């Protein structure tokens, strides 16, 4: 977490690399965590993100919470298709800015209006060099372009926050999908916030960063921040599982045999199961933070009836300890644990990078 937010001046103005002039106001506060708790509760009915670290380990983890609601802009992608949508009138200024600022050659904008940009990515050939695979033309090229347009040395916080799906690996590797996807699946959901709360539970210090953005005669100053409600609603749907008893264990044994033969270097077997949940995502998240403080936690309202909670917990074996993610996805009233197609909470303050050498057995 970036603690420089606590040392920012009360008022400042700066220019991003894309030419956007940003006016930032900083409100410092001290006391209890009511503002943070109110934000967490708000995510049951408004789009937004809370990222939380409830563990302090000197030199490794710090207790810190960060989040926002009512973001003005959302980026969504499915496959090579993308859309940028204004979630309130303030987002229209960002739409106008990005329509002028995006320069990535592989990004084709086929739909343009005051509230929306949409298009697709022109996929390129797979690079020959192993270390260039994540730089292949993909929706991540668009993400990098947006990050570059909004970035500035004067601000450590403004950027993209949200979720990535495992299916992004298909943008890097030419793999054949073997399993049917849901029609409404999204590979990326990222928000651009214009009001950010940061809070240190250990010291009781907090800060609220508020941004105003002018572009070509338009400005967000004085315009309302409220977005349309995205309410978590309980449904009568029943639980389900896509594996019969013992089937997942058999897959693991199959993988172990393949490892022993040298056929696999890495594998991600997965299963999807769900059960009805009477509590809201915010309630589950607060309970996770209370009974299982973890270095990485997240609560997200991703719109379209999809909410997500996540906590990184610790597991141990007889020889060593390891870390593994524990996550619940609330999809229209049913809690599921989609290990196969899990959204990974991330912030895109830096360019995307990472390995994609996984050979998935159930792609």
Image: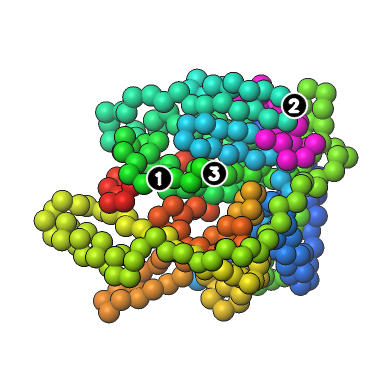
Name the front one of labels 2 and 3: 3
Residue 155, label in figure: none
Q: CA distance from mark 3 to mark 1?
A: 12 Å
Question: Would you say residue 114 is visible in this rendering?
Answer: yes
Q: Quadrant of residue 50?
A: bottom right
- What element does badge 3 sit on? loop
User: Would you call the spot at circle 1 few (<14 residues within 10 Å), some (14-19), or many (20 or more)?
Assistant: few
Q: Which residue is mark 1?
A: 180
The disc, 2 or 3, on the residue closer to the chain's N-terminal end is 2
Q: Which residues are magenta?
A: 85-102
Viewer-proximal residue among 156 and 255: 255
Q: Is residue 95 shown in magenta?
A: yes
> Decide: marks 2, 3 in contact (CB < 8 A)?
no
Q: Mark 2 highlights which residue? A: 114
**Residue at numbered disc 3:** 184
**Vertical relation: 110 (above or below) 211:** above
- In the foreground, 59 or 115: 115
Earlier along the polypeptide chain: callout 1 or callout 2? 2
Residue 87 sits inside the magenta stretch: yes
Other-residue count near label 2 (Cα within 10 Å), few / some / many at <14 / 14–19 / ≥20: some
Q: Is residue 58 visible?
A: no
Image coordinates for residue 293, horizontal then vertical, percent = 55, 74
């Amino acid at each position: 977490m970036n603690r420089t937010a606590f040392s920012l001046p009360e008022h400042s103005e700066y220019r991003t690399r894309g030419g956007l002039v940003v006016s930032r106001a900083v409100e410092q506060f001290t006391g209890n965590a009511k503002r943070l708790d109110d934000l967490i509760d708000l995510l049951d009915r408004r789009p937004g993100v809370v990222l939380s670290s409830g563990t302090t380990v000197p030199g490794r983890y710090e207790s810190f919470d960060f989040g926002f609601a009512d973001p003005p802009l959302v980026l969504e992608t499915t496959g090579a298709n993308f859309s940028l949508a204004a979630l309130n009138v303030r987002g229209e200024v960002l739409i106008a800015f990005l329509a002028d600022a995006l320069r990535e050659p592989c990004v084709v904008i086929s739909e343009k209006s005051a509230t929306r940009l949409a298009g697709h990515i022109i996929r390129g050939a797979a690079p020959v060099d192993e270390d260039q695979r994540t730089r292949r033309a993909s929706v991540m090229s668009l993400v990098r372009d947006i990050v570059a347009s909004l970035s500035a040395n004067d601000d450590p916080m403004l950027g993209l926050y949200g979720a990535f799906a495992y299916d992004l690996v298909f943008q890097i590797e030419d793999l054949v999908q073997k399993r049917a996807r849901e029609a409404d699946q999204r590979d990326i959901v990222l928000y651009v916030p214009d009001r950010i709360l940061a809070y240190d539970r250990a010291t009781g210090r907090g800060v609220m960063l508020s941004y105003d953005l002018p572009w070509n005669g338009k400005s967000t100053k004085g315009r309302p921040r409220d977005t349309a409600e995205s309410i978590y609603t309980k449904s009568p749907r029943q639980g389900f599982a896509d594996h019969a008893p013992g089937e997942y264990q058999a897959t693991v044994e199959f993988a172990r045999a393949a490892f022993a033969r040298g056929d696999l270097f890495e594998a991600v077997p997965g299963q999807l199961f769900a059960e009805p949940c009477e509590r809201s995502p915010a309630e589950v998240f607060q309970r996770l933070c209370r009974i299982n403080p973890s270095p990485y936690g997240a609560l997200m309202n991703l719109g379209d009836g999809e909410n997500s909670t996540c906590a990184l917990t610790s597991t141990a074996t007889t020889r060593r300890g390891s870390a593994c993610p524990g996550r619940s996805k609330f999809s229209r009233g049913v809690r599921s644990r989609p290990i196969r197609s899990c959204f990974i909470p991330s912030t895109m303050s830096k360019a995307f990078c990472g390995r994609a050498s996984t050979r998935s057995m159930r792609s």
